[in-house]
Image: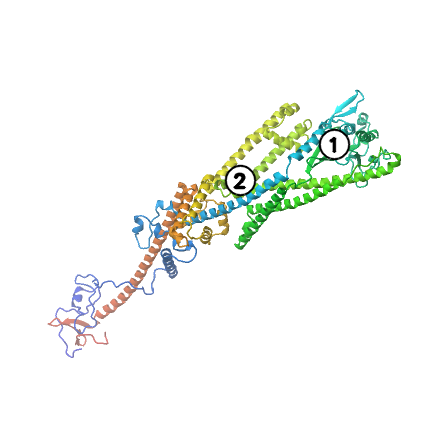
Amino acid sequence: MADTEEPQTPGASTGASTAPGAEPANRENFDTSLPGSTVAVPPLWNGDGFRQESAIPAPPPRKPPPLRNSTIAPWVLAARQQDVQEDEEGREDDFLGSDEGTPRSGQEGSQMSAGSMTGSAASMPYSMDSQPPVEPDANYGGVTLSQLEEFLAVRKGMRMACGTLPLTFGIWLAYVFLVMAVGEAEGPFQTANLIKATVEEAVAQRPHRLWGSQSFRLDEMEDFEDISWWMRSALAPTLDPQFEAFSSSVKIVGFARVVQTKGPEAACAGLTPNMIKFYPGACYPSALPGTILGNLEASDVDDAFQGLGPDRPVEYEAWIDAGRPIEEVQSRIDNLIRYNWIDRRTQNVQIDAFFVNLQTTVYARMELRIQVYREGLIKSLLRVVPVRSRVVTHWSHIFLNLCFVILLIVQIGSFVQQSYAEYERGLWRLHFWDVWTWLDLLSILVAVVIVFMAIAFVVSTEFFTSMISELGNLPSFSVLAAPDSRKVQSILENRQFRGQCAKLLDAVDNVLSLSMWLRYMTAWYAVCLCLRFYRGFTGQPRTAVILQSVMYMSNLFLHYLVVFLVVCGNFALSGYILFGEQVLEWSTFGGSIITLTQVLLGEFDYAALKNVAPVLAMIWWWSFFLTTTVVLSKVLTAAVLQLFLEVRQALGEPGIGLPRQIWAVMKNLWHQRSYEGSMKSVPDDDLLKMLAEDLDPAHVKKLMQMKTDRRLCTREDLARAEKDVRVDADFLVKRGMDPASAERLIERTSRWALGISTTTSATNRLMLLVAKQMEYLSREADRIQRKVRHRVDRAAQSADRVDVKHAKCAALAKRLRRAQQIPAGWTAHRDETGRRFLRHEESGLTSWTLPRALV
């Protein structure tokens, strides 16, 4: 501050303010550039009164400082920063890839790889991180990873299925030759048919009270007395060794046994006194449990009238001395007729005999059952069962048996090996749930049972043959014809011989039972072999489609069978009610079911039904015809056709025919003989295991059996197809294949994929294209949203920085304004040179600058 007071410059105003709202004259007198001024900053306003803009360029981008007055919530900003970080990591995974993991996780797994970007859009993306749109033709042609895996799995399944055919064919061939050689049936049939026809056509003679005699056959008997006379005049001559029809070939072995079952004689229950007038006689009901009849009246004359003991209290047994002269045999039967061995109490009669064909060594067991019904009907059932005495008659039979056993052992070893391999892979549970596994196990068990039963049959047949040879000659005398001096001896000898014959009949019954079960198991083993052939036929695509359709229709057949059985059961019941009393075929409910099946097939006697009830028969038949033949059968045909088309649509391929498949196999074998085919490369099974490492083994097994649905039915199916990976020859070369084999495999897979109608159809391609376009749009929308969020966040941060700068500038402006204001009592003046000075009005003190205490 100067010691002398400077004179006030004329025209200078006092108390001027430096505020923006001050007068312009004061702004003109205010000069901060003068020497000694408090601050030296450029003026905030220019000469025109407008705010002066800074010409300093914007600083380079840098990391923003921490936010102070942020307009975005901190948790929202943190979430957006996390989205940005995940976006950057995902972008690195998409474009950099990884060399580890399964093929789906590597560089080949990127959905929009550089190899799939075709066209101008791929070469000129509109931003650095954007991807080109999906080309319409990019989804057609080429090979995807799923198609390659399915092709390899189908080929492996076809190889495994076709691999069972040689063993199956070998077993079947050995089995056929074995059955034709050992199970020769013509000779036993001729023997059994001869015996049966001779017995059925034998004519019996019976004296009649009105005319001389009455002739009848086995199926023409009308009264219980006809049974005894048929035995005397028809059966006895037939059993005679000198009988013309049997003398050259068939002979009876031992005696013939006749067993009858009697019932008690009792008063008729439930008859009113008026009914007793019409039927004054007794009734003969069936014997109840615990009934004991004991010996008959003529038990002292013949032991046939004696009971068989407490185990068989209502049965009586008579033996016909076959092999003796015909007169002795007939006199034996005459004795039974004389003392009424068969009377009204007889319920049924069973005649057992055993024959042998001396030329073909075939045994035949005859069993004749005669049922006496209380209604007055006599019904007979003749059954002749042959059995060969020698099963193995040539050394070739032993060779065939040995071949069959060896092939069976090979099948068992193959089954055990495959089961152990599946157990090692951890798929034993899935393996044993497979229907073909149970078929193999069933065929093995049936074959083993057949082997052991055949051994038992051979042993029992040899034992039975030895029993026949030990039977010996007939006793010297029959019981009735023996002299008094030999009576007791003949009784004992005949009883002993009868006991041997009874044991022989029991033994032949056991052999026949074993033979029946052996034939039953042998017949079902042929069915098992047929089904095993079907398993091998699954290696042919078209046959596999048919078998898959049949298995797919099992549920339909189950529900259809319920409806069909209900309808047919009720029609059988109605037919039993309408026609059962007058038509033999409808007289029982079981017979009604069989007859109804014949009606369904068109083989029945409508005239018999019409004779019973003409109108009802017509209504019943038309109702059954319209319900079953017209409605149910047509519905079944339509349902089967629809399900077959569904299976075809699900699989998507009709499959190549057998000639094309054989031609493809021959080409493949020829390629393996070539130089390129002989080069070392990764096997198909190892390649499939490598590619399908991240897949479910159950899914791979279903692919092998072609149990897959290629239709895009769910969102998951569409997502898998849309995210499928494209593969090429380089993809396979990196995994151990040589380039030539890789190109050939890609070409074969491509041809196979183009043959699938489901995946190559326009609808499927359109769905896949739309899905990829929607995925592309969603991905681009997410990317744009992340970028917009990032830009908005940066703009918000910039706004926050502007707010901070504004606050700082406002504070600085306040300081400047305060520094440029003249305190009260001071005025600004200028000297003659234009220099500005300050003067204190009260004291008259002048100074170039304000005192330090006032600043």
- Residue 855 point in image, percent of width and height: 23, 74
What kind of residue is marked 2?
Answer: Val
- Residue 141 point in image, percent of width and height: 38, 45
Report the residue at 17% width, 61% height from top: 48
The crowding category of the residue bearing disc 2, from other C-alpha atoms within 10 Å (few below 14, some 14 to 19, many at least 20), is some
Indicate the quadrant where residue 814 lies: bottom left
Considering every residue shown, the one lying at the far left of the view is 832
What kind of residue is marked 1?
Answer: Ile
Considering every residue shown, the one lying at the far right of the view is 485
Q: Which residue is mark 1?
A: 370
| Mark 2, secondary structure of its residue | helix
| Mark 1, secondary structure of its residue | strand
Total numbered labels: 2
Indicate whether 825 appears above or below 243: below
> Could one spot residue 372 in this view of the protein?
no
| Depth order, front residue of 210/45 | 210
Q: Which residue is mark 2?
A: 550
> Could one spot residue 581 in this view of the protein?
yes
Indicate the quadrant where residue 206 lies: top right
Report the residue at 75% width, 31% height from top: 241
